[in-house]
Image: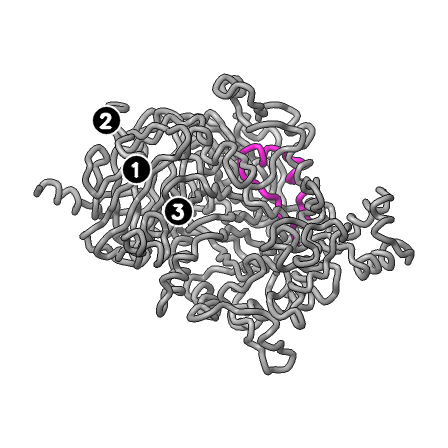
Amino acid sequence: MFLFASIIAAALTLPPFGEVKVVDEIDCTKSDHRFVDSPKGSSTVETILGRQCRVLPVQGGRSSYLNWRIGEGKGLKPNGAYVLVIEYPDDKPRSYYVRNYGNNSRRSFYTGASTGDAYEGPIVHHKPESLKIPQSGAYEKWTALSILSEKASNLRDLDAKKSEAAGVKQFLDIATEGFDVVVGQYRREWNPASEGVAVSKIQLCEIVDEKAAWANVNLPPAPLPRRHVFWREEMSDGQMDAQCKGNAGVDWFEQKCRAMKFFGQNTFCKDLLEFGHNQHWDCNWKQGKPGGKTWKWMWGTKGELADLWSKLVPMVVDKYGFDILPYYEYAGASGDPSESLGPQKRAEPLDMDNKPDRATKGANYTHIWWTDGSLRVDITDPDTIEELKYVLEGTIIRYAEQVEKGGFAGALMRPRPGQWAVGFSDKTRERFAKEANGGKSVSRDDLKRDKALYGRYIAWWGEKRAKFMDEIRRYLEENGVKNAIAILENDDSETGRFLADADGMVTDDPAAWKARLPGKKFTDINDPRLVKDHLFMKSLKSPSGTWGPWEWQHASPACDPEHYAKMKNVWIALPFHALFTVTDPACFSAFGNADGTETIIRHYDLNEGTLDDLGYAMADWERAGRACMLSEITAVANGDPVNLGYLMGSNYTRGFPGPVREFNQNFLALPAVKSSVVKGACSDPEVVLREIDCSGFGVKAKYYALVHTGLTEKHDVTVRLPKGAKGSVEFLAYGRTRPLKNGALEFRKLKPLQLIAIRR
């Protein structure tokens, strides 16, 4: 007993968190810590790679999981910085759903050729990808930053009434009762490649010196424009809402700032409108003042969170030194229809007469009642930009002190299905006639009959949308937001787009998958058509498919990057997720704006409805180890992304923080300026050198992004800089210099999937 206690009290070094103290440890082969397996008795203890593990076979027809209580009676500190550690054998393809109730995170991971996201799972069209990622054949650690909440929900996330009926507590007190940790997996049908969960040990470690473990981020000096790395969470703040008392809301979002410091990110992003509805800001700040609207124009957030935003802005900018990129699912204000655009639904479908339940629900574009069926705007209507400017004034411009400090980067817009639909109302068609049809009026029937006319109409609408985004940028800049950026995330799906003209899951081993699942179709990621015929770009530039009476092609219009090509600091984002979404250089070029750069935004599949007996279950999946950055590394090799965003489902953390923050530190050290590939610079074909010419900003120094895209370690790589380079170079992320040898850099070792920022 004394020996066990000494182990728990021991300190150890855990990169990148520095020194940590083990406060609780679970031997997964034993049945303590309130261990439960589901189905009951389904797990076994087996020897893998010379060590005993708890193994849970994948079940047919139902999900399965292992559950433990960690930290009970260990004096945990709410709001304290901890690391949850899971040791697992990296021997076979496995998928690990992880629910960390200590900080309400569902960050999950998968190894080898397993898929993570549910294969042909429920609710949405999932886009998993299977690649033969090398495995170490050793035990590895999943290490997730966990800044603890005060309370932890029960295993099934039951509300108060259901908890009482089930005879369980709605919330555990983390300080005394600890919290549950679930390691689970989907049913076999949705998890066809996994060999089953296997875990040997789980630890909860307290970080000894949190600030010492924060990442050092070296941003480019003025006047060079800076890059941005940010995330937005969709489903994480329900627990904050349920527990919000006193300063809980501020504490919750300060935890995001602390996480950003660990991961080396620089831009704070929070939703201020979700599905069009107010999220924690005072929409009545100007009521009764000149130019102010009445309380009817938008329904605000209730209770203590009503003006949480006014507390967050100075904390984020003044205390932590971040800039802010507010996120808006703007669909018109959600208030009284007499004063709010959203419920007026001025954008109208092309066919008004065939829509189901029109008499009671109106003529909507889709069956999704909580999006365009509730709120939508016509972006060609001058009233729309005026209302949106009022929103921007209330959420950005009125914070004059932080605006002056450069604390706001700009605005991120993401309309959900139908909220910025292509409109065909009488007034919209009148605008088209005046601006793009020589004054000749057009009817709905004209647009249905004449394909060429319809095509011109869609192009006109796309141009209007791009100008709408540029007007956002202009308004922010004219009101003090320095170098304001405006980003449109046009992909309104959770999962992100698939490939055009392709069938089945993407994999680098179609033969193995066809043998595993006879009769199913698969797409080979090495098929040259993917890049040659630009199948992902073709998908992005195609409107959504539709069915029946609905108009999804108008509710979710195609990406049209050509309309942003001449705009500075305005982007239509290139959405990405799996590797196949970032392999085409032409796709990146197409989404470049007048700056020659791109914004890329990662879509995580929510994976809703995939786990039995765990209430509302969803997951954000990442590949294990350095492969968790595979898509980002490949994107930097193939394009010029300067803004990198993540659309998360749950509370943000990462299970492999080392390669994540290493990437962020190097990515952010480079200026947000267009680059070009230096052909023949690298002795290995999987290593790419991109040169960034900053002379347009009066800066003589040359910047370089050195990108190793390979999945295995490289040795003895020579990188020759152009134009007879001499002297030394600086590795920007770390402040170290190295002399050139005959104009070249020699690397004895490059880690898999590595980005290195260099200045000469």
What residue do we see at 68% from left, 63% from top? 474
Can residue 209 be seen here? Answer: yes
Residue at x 38%, y 61% (from the top left corner): 242
Q: Is residue 545 above or below residue 154?
A: above
Q: Amino acid at mark 1?
A: Leu
* Residue underneath mark 2: 51
| Disc on res. 66 | 1
Q: Which residue is mark 3?
A: 615
Disc nearer the start of the sequence (1/3): 1
| Residue 142 occupies quadrant | top left
Q: If you read the primary sequence from the N terminus, does the residue marked by circle 3 or circle 2 appear first?
A: 2
Give, as a single range, the part of the protein colored magenta.
Answer: 569-594
**Mark 3 residue crowding within 10 angstroms, few (<14) / some (14–19) / many (20+):** few
Q: Which mark is residue 690?
A: none
Mark 2 neighbour density, 10 Å: few (under 14) some (14–19) many (20 or more) = few
Quick check: 369 left or right of 206? right
Q: Quadrant of the N terminus?
A: top left
Image quadrant assignment for residue 12: top left
Classify mark 1: helix, strand or loop. strand
| Residue in front for this viewpoint, 298 or 85 | 298
Name the residue at the left extreme: 2
Foreground: 1 or 72?
72
Which secondary structure lies at badge 3?
Answer: loop
Q: Is residue 590 visible?
A: no
Residue 226 position within the rendered picture, expressed as x and y whole percent measured from the top left:
55, 53
The answer to if 585 sits in the magenta stretch is yes
Front: mark 1 or 3: 3
Kind of residue at badge 2: Arg
Tell me how far mark 1 sits from mark 3, CA to CA: 15 Å
Placement of 749 over or under 263, stated as above or below = above
In the rendering, at what x and y percent does residue 653 appear?
A: 40, 47
**Left or right: 489 with respect to 449?**
left
